Image (cartoon, helix red, strand yellow):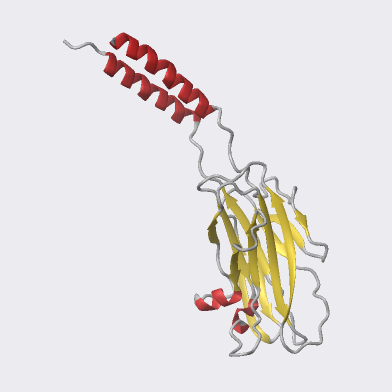
Amino acid sequence: MLKSLSSLWMPAALVLVSSLVAQPVHAAAAGFESGDAQGWTVSADGVQLTAQGSYTVTLTDDRDPSFAYTTTVTPVSGGYFGLLQMGPMPATASTTPVSHGSQAEFTLDLPSAAGDKLFLRLLTADYFYSDAGPGIPAYDDSISVVYDGDTANPDVWRASDILDAGWSGDSGWLPFALPVGTQHLQFTLTNHYSIDGSNAPLAAIDFSVASVPEPSSFALMALGLGVLVRVRSRPRA
């Protein structure tokens, strides 16, 4: 009977391990690791999306020439991140803010899995103006992302969030959990501006993929299952 049990456990263990080893790496990183923005599409309004290993930017304010903030952005994961920069803004004669959004889209090679993360970073000098007062439109620049066309549940970060957090014009890297099964991502970078000036924001984009066990881990699992089989198969004295 014990020998029969062993003969059942060992093949099952091998099947389990072989099936685990055969699992594909999930959620192919949309993370610019080729050193370019290959596979991405952007809106036809002059917006630029580039891969950067490091990027130093100085935020300046059209309304306050004395303001300048310099920061260097580096990747969260891997050697590159994406940098989304807006093109020229449509002309306006408005003295209150109008808005313009630029878009970038990407389709993952495989659906995202549990633990995969998206990181966004908003840089804008407009965080000073995000709270203009009751009834006054705000210069509330933002970066948002829609998953698989679900426009009712976007992730958004605004200039007002930077202000509320007491930070400078740099939000820092913000982690967002990718909904499991996500394949299509659509980003919108929105600038609020007026005839008085336009402090067009920048957005950095990065990804991290949940760790997948190395083959050595599967080997250890097989060894452990084998030991378990032998222990259970040992006859009583």
Q: Is residue 199 visible?
A: no
Residue 18 at x, y percent in the picture: 51, 23
Q: Is residue 18 above or below residue 159?
A: above
Residue at left offset 64%, top offset 89%: 136
Q: Nearer the viewer, residue 19 or 196?
A: 19
- Residue 112 drawn above or below residue 1: below
Q: Residue at x 19, y 12 (%)?
A: 236
Using residue 109 as the reference point, say whether residue 43 is left or right of it.
right
Q: Position of residue 230 (x, y in %)?
A: 31, 16
Place residue 47 in its image quadrant. bottom right
Q: Is residue 27 visible?
A: yes
Give the position of the N terminus as an image quadrant.
Answer: top left
Count of numbered circles on the image: 0
Quarter of the image for the C terminus: give it: top left
Q: Position of residue 186 (x, y in %)?
A: 69, 58
Instruction: Note whether 155 is above or below 184 in the view shown.
Output: below
Could you tell me which residue is drawn at 28 percent across and 11 percent down?
2
In the displayed structure image, the side of residue 156 where residue 231 appears, left or right: left
Q: Position of residue 38 (x, y in %)?
A: 75, 48
**Residue 123 picture quarter:** bottom right
Q: Nearer the viewer, residue 33 or 91?
A: 91
The quadrant holding residue 195 is bottom right
